[in-house]
Amino acid sequence: MERKRTGDREPGPVPLLVPVDRFGFLKQEHGNSPQCFTKTRSSSNYEKEERRVTKWRKMIGAGGSDWKHYVRRKPHVVKRRIRKGIPDCLRGLVWQLISGSRDLLLMNPGVYEQLVIYETSASELDIIRDISRTFPSHVFFQKRHGPGQRSLYNVLKAYSVYDRDVGYVQGMGFVAGLLLLYMSEEDAFWLLVALLKGAVHSPMEGLYQPGLPLVQQYLLQFEQLVRELMPKLGEHFTQEMINPSMYASQWFITVFSYSFPFHSALRIWDVFLAEGVKIVFKVGLALLKSCHDDLVKLPFEELMHALRNFPEDAMDPDTLLPLAYSIKVAKRLEEMKQDSEKAVAKPANPVQL
């Protein structure tokens, strides 16, 4: 028998190359998982994207140095470009600029490190338990105790210490996970702070406080908007005893980052960070409107299935978002908010003795 030459080795197992989409999600043939709905990109699309990137780079300047000046000079141009979608290669930086988180980071040097390394959280076991449920089909978060899961743990733990009144709630994982796909741990943490504490728009910490008070408020408002804008569907929901808590809670808690096509979720987040929570209402209403004629015919069980499994063409951002933009809700939401505040502030009638 011929002896093996020095340096010869038995071949080891060949690592399997798992196909992933351009966002890093494992490819699947079917289903409405977050990685679905990635469009094929032709050379002309790449050229168009390059032109968009060039425009955006000129608009924001090196490291975002020109951003505030440009926003003051041409706010309508900025709004239009954000609604068309932020180039993916610049998304992380632009999200930090439009959310106000970059300023928070610069004003609080060393705070994140302090929270991660030197503080302890009562939520640590809950965070560890939930981490593997966050974007499990994304390569960054797949490996147990891998870099993605460690980063996610650090961000969620840091926030639970930073705001002990909120602590940690499961839906926060998808928000933090989405941010970590586009920025560093520290940047993701301060963007989470900016959102929940209201650096630019209304504070959203009520989405995660005990009892989820802001979720309850938004769902009541959403139900009223459905009745007003789509009365036939609103009446059908009443007859079938369907309310928004049965299908729309995650839309608000995770801003469509849970079980929504990832490409669509990113486009929604672009607008959400720039314009606030009204886009969540608009998108939710647009989904119902696009499927209205089918939904009004369905009995309870089929209706619940449809509300949790919208067809892919209904979730295509190039058709969904223009429809959403056409739905005006800001004035009505403000009226409902004021009515609610008046009802709370109204003193009780004195008891007649």
Image (cartoon, rainbow, N blue to C red):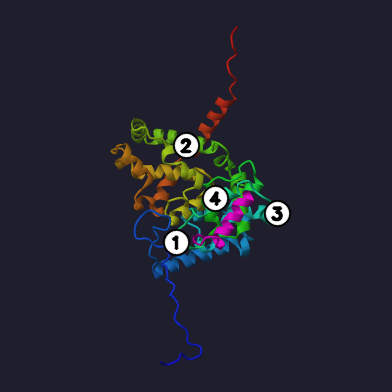
Image position of 249 with respect to 228: above or below: below
Q: Which residue is mark 3?
A: 118
Magenta stretch, main secondary structure, is: helix
Residue type, mark 1 in image: Phe
Task: Kindly identify the amino acid type of the residue bearing the numbered disc 4.
Answer: Leu
Pick the quarter of the image with the C terminus: top right
Give how far across and how far down residue 272 sits, in percent: 52, 49
User: Residue at the spot x=45%, y=82% of the render?
Assistant: 10
Q: Amino acid at mark 3?
A: Tyr
Nearest to N terminus: mark 4 or mark 1: 1
Across and down, in percent, residue 25 comes to 44, 61
Which callout, 2 or 3, points at the residue further toward the start of the chain?
3
Q: CA distance from mark 3 to mark 1?
A: 34 Å
First-in-chain label (2 vs 4): 2
Amino acid type of the residue that numbered disc 2 sits on in the rendered structure: Leu
- Mark 3, Cα crowd under 10 Å, few <14 / some 14-19 / many 20+, is few
What separation in Å lies between label 4 and label 3 (alpha carbons)? 31 Å
Give x and y (percent) for residue 229: 39, 36
Q: Which mark is residue 76?
A: none
The Cα atoms of the two marked residues, 2 and 3, are separated by: 38 Å
Front disc: 4 or 1: 1
| Label 4 sits on residue | 273
Location of mark 1 (residue): 25
Q: Is residue 325 left or right of residue 193?
A: left
Name which residue lies at 59% across and 51% down: 156
**Residue numbers of the magenta segment:** 141-159
Rate crowding at label 2 as few (under 14), some (14 to 19) or many (20 or more) other CA atoms within 10 Å. Answer: many
User: Can you tell which mark lies on residue 219?
Assistant: 2
Looking at the image, is mark 1 or mark 2 nearer the viewer?
A: 1
